Image (cartoon, coloured by chain):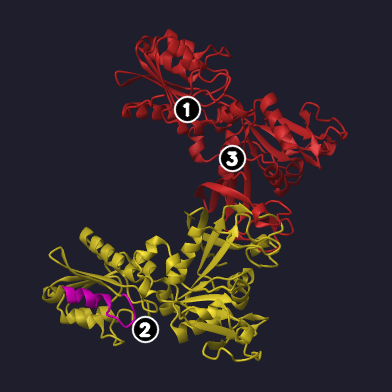
Chain colours: A yellow, B red
Amino acid sequence: MTQTVFSSFDYKMMTQAIALAKQGTYTTAPNPNVGCVITKEKTVIGQGAHLKAGQPHAEVHALRQAADQAKGATAYVTLEPCSHYGRTPPCAEALIKAQVARVVCAMQDPNPQVAGRGVQMLRDAGIQVDVGLLEQDAINLNPGFIKRMKTGMPFVQLKLAASLDGKTALANGESQWITGAKARQDVQAYRAKAGAILSTVKTVIDDDASLNVRWQELPNSVQAVYQKDLVRQPIRVILDRQGLLQDAQYSDLKLWKNEGDVLAVHDPLIEPPLSLKSYQQFVAAKVVNQQFELPALLKQLADEHNINHVWVEAGAQLAASFIEQNCVDELIVYLAPKLMGTDGRGLTQLCGLSSMSDIIELDIKDVRMVGSDIRLTAAIKTK
Amino acid sequence: MTQTVFSSFDYKMMTQAIALAKQGTYTTAPNPNVGCVITKEKTVIGQGAHLKAGQPHAEVHALRQAADQAKGATAYVTLEPCSHYGRTPPCAEALIKAQVARVVCAMQDPNPQVAGRGVQMLRDAGIQVDVGLLEQDAINLNPGFIKRMKTGMPFVQLKLAASLDGKTALANGESQWITGAKARQDVQAYRAKAGAILSTVKTVIDDDASLNVRWQELPNSVQAVYQKDLVRQPIRVILDRQGLLQDAQYSDLKLWKNEGDVLAVHDPLIEPPLSLKSYQQFVAAKVVNQQFELPALLKQLADEHNINHVWVEAGAQLAASFIEQNCVDELIVYLAPKLMGTDGRGLTQLCGLSSMSDIIELDIKDVRMVGSDIRLTAAIKTK
């Protein structure tokens, strides 16, 4: 296979299509972020982004703008145009009808079952198709969608926050506001990107945590591109082995008072106390050694709820479970510029690491300051 | 007082003088790093750096190069020229003799007892003197020298190294190589800059630590500017309350086998076992609650050994002592991309922090990757 040579103009246009795709960052779930630019004689004649499931795809917006001029034009798309009838007709068909001359895709469809079909449809219609321009940037647009399409599992980010000496609370449990205001805003932005926010009944009850997206607490940079009336609330998945949340004494929690669905996960072998919250969904998941089997639960979230991207925010025990069960794609670690002392509570409850070869090794992808705190992005190395 | 306006040429020349000053980074202790550039009609006619105590000052090197042309020239110096007879005659006098027309200093002499005298000598001789160009950069050249001159105390850097969850070793003590090769090279560079490396008898005995500068382990960037035959070994200050190092059983330690002085610090109330190592210096320092009074010890290092800059490298207990006794100017924290688990040993032994207001707050000055590890530079905020 020969390597396609892209021109600097091609790079510029795909860069623009990628920037357009980012307009959907907070709204397209469970669909992917896609951008499209149509050019003719080195002039942009149409552009568009996919913004929300059920609404037109990026190519359709761009083709509408280009109208009759699309004939003989070049379309730059960040993802292979779809070839199937979903809630909207296939984009490959629309591009063929518009008689474009060339389509440049940043990447193939990640779903192995349909990958290449859109390209084939276009080529069969005599359109030149070039694939692979700025592919990594296109992949970075949709880590969750791509992982789910490829593996059937969602992309999981685990949030950790601790002092520089790895403590999350003093020995007496006192812990409010370890990280600063900017880090808390940053967490809101991560929540806003996710399809699900996963936590535990302990966090919900102890902290009366809402675990929702609060527009007014998003960073200004996010507010600038995400209008308040478009706010989409991720589904809140609460691990609640004993079904405590169904108890009347917890009917006043903030969790219930905010918009957004709650999916409480309980142990099917434990009889829940009382089904007060019958309007909320409760699902049963397998429990082994008093821990939920997280891979099976995550698969269920992907299959039954189209969740691409899970943001996990809870205590040291759940963090340890996710790590031990190999369910973390990315650790997002906030380190506050503080020393909390020997007696403080630890970052994870990873027990029994007794030799240096048991240690969990990370690959740091990014490190930066977020206000006065440090934020690390890391992947766990496979052994 | 009117603000002096410096030209872009002035900035350029002082930048060059600061770059020259850095040539002495590893060799000038206990003297400061100083650079000098002499120009005439916007052409450099002489330049120099102070490289080693006892050797000529930067101004002298530059004046020698400029020779007769120095008359009517401008001299850019990173530090106020000295006004007193030390091991070399005063530089202010040399500049007057050379009949330069103007002297630009980045900063005043930090010693409040002589600050301004050099400037005054020059002005009295009819030379125009402008002070304050790129002052902060000049201050950054000599944190240790400046602190000792101003306060009588050395500048103290405390090294910490831990996993991302704040552990320095597994519960069983296993810990070798938590950080990677690049971080260990980086530590060598910090040691090389210091006047003293301070540690404990426990570190020396348990790890058979040499605590010296090993040229072949310095980063390439340092080797490029620091010739092997110029290597200066910082004095090694070992806290040894009971005088254990004088015991014959420890006569084979690497500590004794490397070049460089050892200053063992013992409790004057404890009789040392045997004075085998009488050729080494032993000093007595005050002990309160089984801990050395660190401020008094540091003052002794500054007063009696001209130590500007102390690099502290030891275990969690000494780290806690330095922090609790407010003796740290800068924390250098290496975080390895690892999770070591709940049972691991902690970064510091700061005990009894029982409320959030007891927490030690840091100000992060720098964060960067060093190889695969993260390095933070932080100051402790005063309460």
Residue at image coords 28%, 62%: A15
Residue B268, above or below B98: below
Is residue A48 one of those drawn in magenta?
A: no
Q: Which residues are magenta?
A: A51-65
Marks 1 and 3 belong to one chain: yes
Amino acid at pointer 3: Gln
Q: Quadrant of the C terminus of chain B?
A: top right
- Image marks 2 and 1: residues in contact by CB distance under 8 Å: no
Quarter of the image for residue B101 reads top left
Q: Is residue A104 left or right of residue B119?
A: left
Dot 1: element: helix
Q: For mark 3, what is the residue?
A: B188
Q: Which mark is residue B21?
A: 1
Q: Is residue B261 visible?
A: no
- In this view, the residue in front, A346 or A13, is A346
Q: Please state which of the two labelled residues, at mark 2 or mark 1, is closer to the viewer.
A: 1
Percent coordinates x, y for residue B68 in the rendering: 37, 9
The answer for how far apart the CA atoms under marks 2 and 1 are is 65 Å
Q: Spatial distance from mark 1 to mark 3, Cα to Cα?
A: 21 Å
Chain under callout 1 = B
